[in-house]
Image: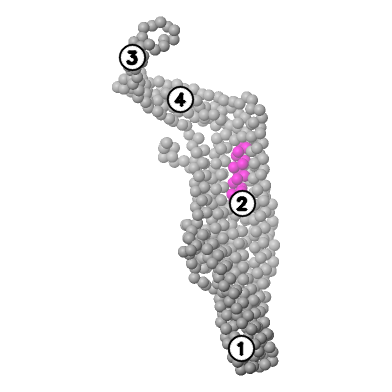
Amino acid sequence: MRRARRAGVTGVSTAGVAHAGLLLAAGIFIAGCSVGPNYKRPSAPSATKWDLAEPWREGAPKDAIPKGPWWTVFHDEDLNALETQALAANQTIKISIARLEQARATAAIQVATLFPMLNTSPSAERQRLSGNRPTSGVPITLRPATQNNFAVPFTVSYEVDLFGRRRRSIEAAEASYQANAADLENVRLLVTAQLAGDYFNLRELDSELKILTRTVEALQKGLELVNSRHSGGVASGLDVAQEETLLNTTRTQAVLLQQQRKQFEDAIAVLVGQPAPDFHMPPRVLDAEPPGLDVGLPSDLLERRPDIAEAEREMAVANAQIGVARAAYYPSLDIFGQGGWQAANIAKLANASSTFWALGANVAQDIFSGGTLRAQVQFARAGYDANVANYRQTVLGAFQEVQDEITGLSVLIQAKQSQQLAVNAARRTLDISTSRYSGGLVSYLDVVTAQQNLLTDEQELAVIQGQRLISSVLLVKALGGGWDASSLAAVQVKPKAKDIVTP
C-alpha cells in the first residue's frame, strides 16, 4: 500500500486538528478484517514413547534438568566457572544477541505503523520579487517588491488498515522477533554444550595421561629389575629390549596425548572468549559421574527444544506473509490533514486569520499488474509450505538425537561394567605373570604382554567414562537444556510513550 501524498508547505490548525481527528477516528473505525489464513501450528510426527533398553531404567533416577544453568547437574565447579565465562564473553552468543536486537527494532518499526504520522517543517523566508516578473499574459504594471514569509506547517497522515496488511506485517515481525529469541537460546545451548563436551574430553585425556604416567613409572622399575637380572646372567637381552620397547612406546603415547589435550584447551579458550596462548587449565583426573536425567515424553520436545520453537515461529512468519500478499489485491485508503499558520509579518503569525488547513483522503488500487499479485501470493504460500517441511524435519531430527543418546548411554553403561571387569582381570594377570617370571616359570614376554594389556584396558575404561559424560551432555542438549518455549510469550514489542513521540 502507498503512503499518503503530501503537499509542499502544510500544517494543522485548531479546526484542522478537529477535522483530522474525526477522519482518523473514522479510518480506525472502518478498519476491516485481516485477509489471509489465521495461523495454526501444523501437526508434526511424534512417537508415543522412547525405545528404552536395560539397564537405562535402573540407571536413570529421573531427575529434572535445571532451568537455565543445566550444566550444574554435573557438580563440577571448574565447568560451572567456564560456562559462566562463555555466556558473558563468547562472540557467537554476542552475534546472536545483536541479531535479536535487530529483530526487535524491525518489529518496533512495524508496530509504529499503527499510529498516525505527524510532521512539521517551520520556515522563515525573506525575498525580493522582480519588477519584470511574468504576469501570465495579463498586462499589469509591476514593481519590485520585498516580502517576508513565515510558516509553521503540520502534516498528519494515516493509512487505514482496511484488509489487515499492516496487522499481518506486525504479526510476521513479532513472530520473527520470537524466532530470533529462540535462535539465541539455541546458540547458547550449542555453545554451552560444546564447552561441556570439550571440557570432559580434556578431563578424559587427563585421566589417560595419569594412567600413562603411572605406567611409565612402573615400566621404569620393571626395566631396572630386568637390567639387574640381565647383569646377573638371569635375564636375557631380549627381556631388556622388550621392556625398553614398551616403555618408550608408552612415553610416545603420552607426548601425543599432550598435543590432543592442548587442542581441546585451545578450543575451550575460544568458547570462553580468551586468546588460546594465554589460556591454561591445570590437569585433573576425571572423577565425575553422569547425572540421572528425565527424558520425559517425545511430545515434550516440541516445547523444550529452542530450534523446534524457532522453526515453529518461522512458520508463523511465513503464514502472516500470505496475508500481506493477499492484502495487495484490495485498495488502500490514506487519510491526511494539512494545516498551520502562515503570515508575512511574524507578529501576526499566531492570529486566527493566519491559519490554513486542508483535509483529504486517497484511495489506491492496482487494476492491472500482469499477474504480479497472484505470483506474490503463490510465492508466500510456497514459502509457508517449505517452513512446514523444515519444522517437521527439525522435529524428526530431534527425536533421532534423543534416541541416539539414550541408546548410547545404555550401551556405555554396559561397556563400563564389562571393561571394569577386564581391567581387574588384567591386573591379576600382570601380578601372576610377574610372580611366575620371578620364579623362572615363564619368559618376560608374558610380563610385557600383561603390562601392555593392562595399559590398554585402563585407557579404554577412561575413554568409556569420558564418553558417558559427553553423551550425557549431548542428551541434555538434545532435550533442550532445560529451556521451555513458554518463555517466548514475553518476547513482544510493546511501544512506550517516549518511543512514539521521539523522532
Q: Are marks 3 and 1 in contact (CB under 8 Å)?
A: no
Q: Label 3 near label 2: C-beta < 8 Å?
A: no
Counting residues from the start of the chain, the first of labels 2 and 1 encountered is 1
Residue 237 location, x and y as percent? 65, 87
* Res. 337 mark: 4
Q: Amino acid at mark 3?
A: Ala
Assess disc 2: are there few (<14), some (14-19) or many (≥20) residues with their C-alpha within 10 Å of its C-alpha.
many
Task: Decide whether residue 312 is among the magenta residues.
Answer: yes
* C-alpha distance separating marks 1 and 4: 105 Å
Helix or strand or loop: what does disc 2 sit on? helix
Q: Nearer the viewer, residue 195 or 329?
A: 195
The amino acid on which the numbered mark 2 sits, given as a three-letter code, is: Ile
Q: Please report the residue visible at 67 percent of the width from the left and 92 percent of the height from the top.
A: 440
Residue type pointed to by label 1: Val
Instruction: Please tell me whether mark 2 or mark 1 is closer to you in this view.
Output: 1
The amino acid sitting under disc 4 is: Gly
Q: Which residues are magenta?
A: 308-323
Give the residue number, with chain letter if any, for mark 3: 145
Q: Is residue 410 magenta?
A: no
Mark toward the start of the polypeptide (2 vs 3):
3
Residue under label 2:
308
